[in-house]
Amino acid sequence: MLRHRLLVALAAAVGTWQLCQNAAVVVQILFATRTLGLSAQAVGLCYAGMGVGTVLASVFGNRISRRVGPGPCLVLGFAVCSAAWLLLAAAPVGRWGVAAFATMLMLYSTGAVLIFINFLALRQAVTPEPLLGRMTSTMRWLILLPAGPGALLGGWLGEHFGLRAALAFAGGVGSLLVLLAWRHPVIRSVLALPQLDPAPALLPAREGA
């Protein structure tokens, strides 16, 4: 992992996204019910927007990735999620707030699919088959490590500064992630799935070699 620049960049980027995502998730239902005044039924109906976003991204995600490249498409996913959290942070009370909550869920699910179809494809494309299991477990540990601190931070911000502040934090840090990821040459330059080196440096040396 540490010897491959793309894997390190992916772990850092998606780990930061997990921090933002968990900071938003812990407060979004409270925001919908307490601030926007949604009923349980209205919340359930709004969550149907997640299904719409997931289907749209699943249908068009591969086309977008092939057109702009896996790296830029990954950054696009970060941008869509960040826009969703910022939209909810600024949502007014009333029918427009309900529409904003449903739209946020749709955008979030769209962005998440764009992120993970490219993230999973890229990390597997550069990893030799004998190391796929170890790479996957290591990568999952690395990207989920920031989830706990993100949830705690989101809850703390929501309690002390308001639920909008937690959502704005998620969207703001997510927007900074978009800027940094786009400027990162390793991620931005990935316009096609990398070809695996026939003799990759990732493979451990055999004993006695």
Image (cartoon, rainbow, N blue to C red):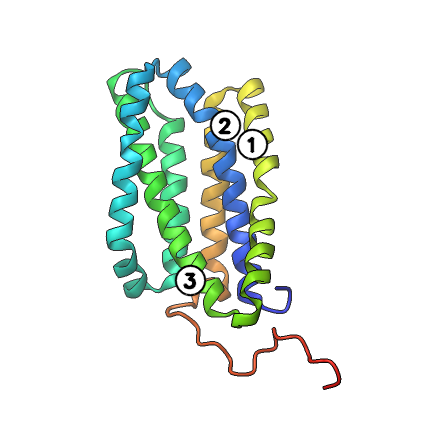
Residue 181's spot in the image, x, y percent?
48, 55
Q: Residue at x 63, y 69 (%)?
A: 3
Give the mark toward the camera: 2 or 3. 3
Reading the image, the residue beneath label 1 is 151
Residue 121 disc label: 3
Give the mark toward the camera: 3 or 1. 3
Crowd around label 1: few <14 · some 14–19 · many ≥20 (10 Å): many
What distance separates the C-alpha of mark 1 from that of mark 2?
A: 6 Å
Label 2: state its secondary structure.
Answer: helix
User: Would you say the residues marked 1 and 2 are in contact, meaning their CB atoms lie under 8 Å apart?
Assistant: yes
Label 3: state its secondary structure.
Answer: helix
Q: Amino acid at mark 2?
A: Val
Identify which residue, 169 or 146, lies in the foreground: 146
Residue 27's spot in the image, x, y percent?
47, 25
Q: Amino acid at mark 3?
A: Ala
Identify which residue, 67 or 26, lies in the foreground: 26
Q: Residue at x 37, y 28 (%)?
A: 88
